[in-house]
Image (cartoon, rainbow, N blue to C red):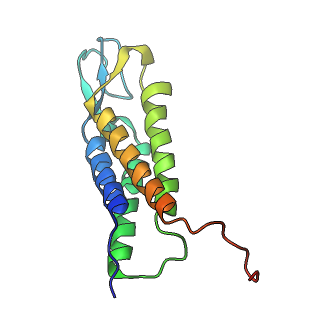
Amino acid sequence: MKGKLEREEIIAVAGGAILAIGVFLAWYKLDNRFASIGPHGPGRAGLTLSAWKALSTMRYVLLVGAASPLILAYIVIRGHALSWPRGELTAVVAIIVVTLVLLRGLIVKPGDPAGQISLQLGWVVALVGSILMLGGAVFHRARNDTGPRKPPGVP
């Protein structure tokens, strides 16, 4: 019999989709003509850049993270057996993604000078998507927790 997605898993999938959309929306705005992010922007005040343009390696990490709840949904719908509790791996990936989004938005902004780079709606969308992923995975895991697991060979 094929598996069925639960409400929390659907929330995590929606969060992944929102995160993926957020990667392509504007994350950063250059506030003056001296600000730049990599090769973008010297002399172009008001230029906005998406995470896809501004973050060379992290853009792929974010998209892979956004795909994790979709992969779990595919596995569940197809009825494949899992060797880990549903939602656990998605929660771990979501924690990493939330941390990266917060890090690149609040702590380590790209560009020079970082004080002249402001955040835009795309960053907020990505943050909301990653929090939805995390919330869906954590609430699913909490609702279906069967108690502490025992080591192999213990009755």
Query: Which residue corresponds to the image point at 33% horizontal and 69% vertical from the top-left?
Result: 5
Q: Residue at x 28, y 53 (%)?
A: 17
* Residue at the far bottom in the pictured view: 1
Q: Is residue 19 above or below residue 78?
A: above
Q: Position of residue 89 (x, y in %)?
A: 51, 62
Q: Quadrant of the C terminus?
A: bottom right
Residue 37 falls in which quadrant of the image?
A: top left
Specify whether 86 is left or right of 63.
Answer: right
Q: How many marks?
A: 0
Q: Is residue 109 visible?
A: no
Residue 45 versus residue 151 in the image, above or below: above
Q: In the rendered image, which quarter is residue 22 located in? A: top left
Q: Is residue 6 left or right of residue 101?
A: left
Residue drawn at the location 37% of the way across and 82% of the way down: 79
Q: Position of residue 30 (x, y in %)?
A: 30, 19
Q: Nearer the viewer, residue 87 or 114?
A: 87
Give the side of residue 48 with respect to residue 66, left or right. left
Which residue of the protein is positioned furthest toward the right in this rendering?
154
Residue 134 horizontal/vertical position (percent): 44, 50
Quadrant where the N terminus sits is bottom left
Along the viewing direction, whichever of 18 and 51 lies nearer the viewer: 18
Camera-side residue of 15 and 35: 15
- Indicate the quadrant where residue 42 lies: top left
Q: Against 49, is 130 above or below? A: below
